[in-house]
Image (tube, grey):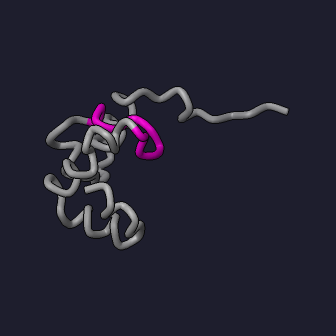
Amino acid sequence: MIRICPLARWQVEDVGAYLLTHDIPFLRHYHHRGFEARTTARLTGDAVRQNILSDIKRDDPQAWNRLVARFPELRAFV
């Protein structure tokens, strides 16, 4: 069995370049903090402890509202 996953080796710069090249929208949070601000597929415990949710809420209130509409339990961390 062979597993083919071409995106598995993409770095933060690759993802950022692809988004910018193809004019794909992304959260304003990344405009302020850069694409390195989040490099995992989920929010890590460290990110939550470092108040990343507060940053997202402050930087992009509309995105925050969409996020907590889907995951209301996040309100407890801000």
Q: Residue at x 27, y 42 (%)?
A: 20
Is 42 inside the magenta-drawn segment? Answer: yes
> Is the N terminus in the top left, top right, bottom left or bottom right quadrant?
top right
Report the residue that reaches farthest toward the front. Answer: 76
Looking at the image, residue 20 sits to the left or right of residue 3; the answer is left
Viewer-nearest residue: 47 or 23: 47
In which quadrant is the C terminus drawn? Answer: bottom left
Residue occupying the point 45% across, 46% down: 42
Q: Main secondary structure of the magenta part?
A: loop
Relative vertical location of residue 14 with respect to residue 41 in this rendering, above or below: above
Towards the viewer: 3 or 43: 43
Question: Which quarter of the picture shows residue 69?
Answer: bottom left
Does 76 appear above or below 44? Answer: below
Please state the horizontal and vertical placement of residue 30, each as a whole percent of the image. 23, 43
In the displayed image of the protein, which residue is found farthest to the bottom?
Answer: 69
In the rendered structure, the answer to whether residue 27 lies left or right of residue 68 reads left
Asked if residue 50 lies left or right of residue 6, the reply is left
State yes or no: residue 36 in magenta: yes
In this rendering, position of residue 75 left or right of residue 28: right
Q: Quarter of the image holding residue 50? A: top left
Q: Which residues are magenta?
A: 35-45
